[in-house]
Image: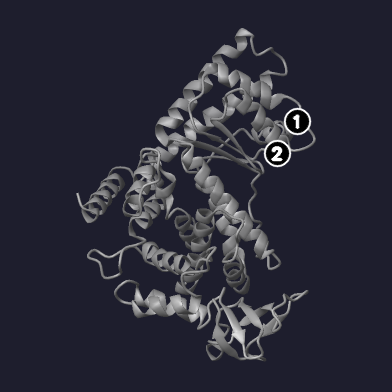
């Protein structure tokens, strides 16, 4: 079977699955998840409280532990990985908000019992037996250590062979009057982004279902960055030598995709979906074919197989499947591509061409942009590519330029106005005598300096 036929078959499979499932819009399924989720949370809460009055070997524990085993098995049959998230006084199971008894004391409800260990959520990657639940409730109700309680509890569970229960950090909602943080440290955001993607790949490599929630939280931080910080993060991350290459590539492609999506005018919720989808575009390389990652020709279909193996369907997963299949598809290919696929194609190729390697990048950003622009209408969506060019300008963020006075500068901004298309904000990275500056030296090319040549 040719690669084209394989892609076509995979797309037809996705379409059939959509027609049959559509779990994101299935009210009956949502109601079932909510019903089983409420049973599960109530039983786990009750079993945890019972440890205060009964030894877990007491016969009184048999019924609730057996019910816990059954309810989790039922949830896993519906959903695959089961995720329980506690945000303030609200509890969600796989994004379905539960209706729990609000008469319980605030310091004794399900969320409060786990918050003692600085746990804000649970990922359940496998069905657990009664005996495993017995060990879990004992560990969860033990006194929490003063330092790193979540890590300590996770280590205790894993030592007991309970690695199928993954403890998540504390989550919170953004308050209605909470504005975007304009003072976020760009380097810290991108470092966390690469770390989250590292965790995503590690989980997939160990056979766990992909968990999009930490990725989405990280993407929300990216979306919250003001425009100039967004461009600066792209510039500085290009030279990051400490992060795993695949993680750095995925987080950079996500940032570039969000940048393009913002120029398209996508709302922030859709930008977040786009960013998460971009993080997954090379998911296939985290899968295994006889002990090795699949080759380039099959990494898209390998990603789709991995996503199809996870039970449950929703619109976001379909975006990810299509993007995995389409992010190398030419614009003029028969059948076309989704909007996310066309955006990620541009972001992925630009990052690949300009990525800094030990021997230097394949191309300087201005050269890569010119090459891609020559392929508009054939390889790339011409309107999306033009929006990208309009945003990053003649010298895209991450370009290193030599000025007429001999200094080298790193481009940190995109286009601030049409008149400044080739006059971005920069920072000196090498003095004319070849030394590095002791302190940051910003240079606005609209006010001083002229470009002699592109270095890299």
Residue on which the image places disc 1: 144
Q: Position of residue 251 (x, y in %)?
A: 53, 58
Residue 442 percent location from the top left of the image: 70, 80
Image point (48%, 29%), residue name:
126
Whichever of labels 2 and 1 marks the residue nearer the N terminus, that label is 2
Q: Are marks 2 and 1 in contact (CB under 8 Å)?
A: yes
Q: Where does residue 174 sit, x and y in percent of width and height?
A: 64, 56
Using the image, determine if residue 169 lies above or below residue 424: above
Label 2 neighbour load within 10 Å: few <14, some 14-19, many 20+:
many
Query: How does the figure colour the protein chain or chains?
Result: one colour
Q: Tell whether 59 sits left or right of 206.
A: right
Above or below 100: residue 56: above
* Label 2: which secondary element: loop
Q: Is residue 326 above or below residue 346?
A: above
- Rendered residue at 60%/77% (across/down): 413
Can see residue 104?
no
């Amino acid at each position: 079977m040719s690669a084209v036929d394989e892609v076509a078959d995979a797309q037809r499979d996705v379409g059939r699955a959509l027609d049959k499932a559509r779990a994101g819009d299935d009210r009956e399924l949502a109601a079932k998840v909510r019903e089983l989720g409420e049973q599960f949370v109530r039983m786990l809460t009750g079993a945890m409280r019972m440890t205060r009055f009964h030894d877990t070997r007491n016969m009184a524990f048999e019924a609730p532990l057996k019910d816990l085993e059954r309810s989790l098995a039922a949830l896993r049959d519906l959903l695959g990985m089961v995720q329980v998230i506690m945000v303030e006084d609200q509890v969600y199971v796989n994004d379905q908000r539960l209706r729990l008894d609000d008469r319980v004391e605030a310091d004794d409800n399900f969320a409060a019992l786990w918050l003692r260990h600085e746990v804000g959520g649970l990922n359940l990657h496998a069905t657990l037996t009664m005996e495993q639940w017995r060990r879990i409730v004992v560990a969860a109700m033990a006194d929490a250590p003063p330092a790193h309680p979540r890590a300590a509890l996770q280590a205790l569970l894993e030592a007991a062979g309970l690695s199928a229960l993954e403890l998540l950090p504390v989550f919170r909602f953004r308050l209605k009057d909470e504005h975007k943080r304009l003072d976020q440290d760009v380097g810290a955001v991108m470092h966390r982004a690469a770390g989250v993607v590292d965790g995503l790949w590690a989980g997939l490599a160990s056979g766990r279902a992909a968990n999009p929630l930490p990725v989405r939280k990280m993407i929300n931080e990216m979306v919250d960055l003001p425009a100039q910080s967004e461009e600066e993060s792209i510039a500085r991350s290009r030279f990051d030598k400490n992060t795993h290459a695949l993680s750095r590539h995925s987080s950079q492609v996500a940032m570039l995709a969000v940048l393009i999506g913002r120029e398209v005018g996508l709302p922030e919720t859709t930008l977040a979906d786009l960013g998460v989808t971009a993080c997954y575009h090379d998911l296939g390389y985290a899968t295994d074919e006889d002990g090795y990652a699949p080759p380039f020709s099959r990494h898209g279909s390998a990603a789709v197989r991995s996503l199809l193996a996870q039970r449950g369907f929703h619109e976001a997963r379909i975006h990810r499947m299509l993007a995995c299949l389409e992010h190398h598809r030419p614009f003029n290919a028969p059948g076309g591509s989704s909007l996310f696929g066309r955006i990620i194609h541009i972001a992925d190729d630009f990052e690949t061409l300009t990525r800094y390697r030990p021997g230097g990048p394949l191309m300087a950003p201005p050269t890569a942009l010119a090459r891609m622009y020559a392929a508009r209408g054939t390889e790339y969506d011409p309107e999306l590519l033009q929006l990208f060019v309009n945003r990053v300008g003649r010298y895209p963020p991450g370009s290193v330029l030599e000025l007429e006075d001999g200094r080298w500068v790193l481009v940190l901004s995109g286009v601030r106005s049409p008149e400044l298309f080739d006059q971005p904000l920069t920072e000196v990275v090498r003095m004319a005598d070849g030394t590095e500056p002791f302190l940051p030296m910003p240079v606005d090319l609209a006010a001083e300096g002229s470009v002699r040549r592109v270095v890299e």
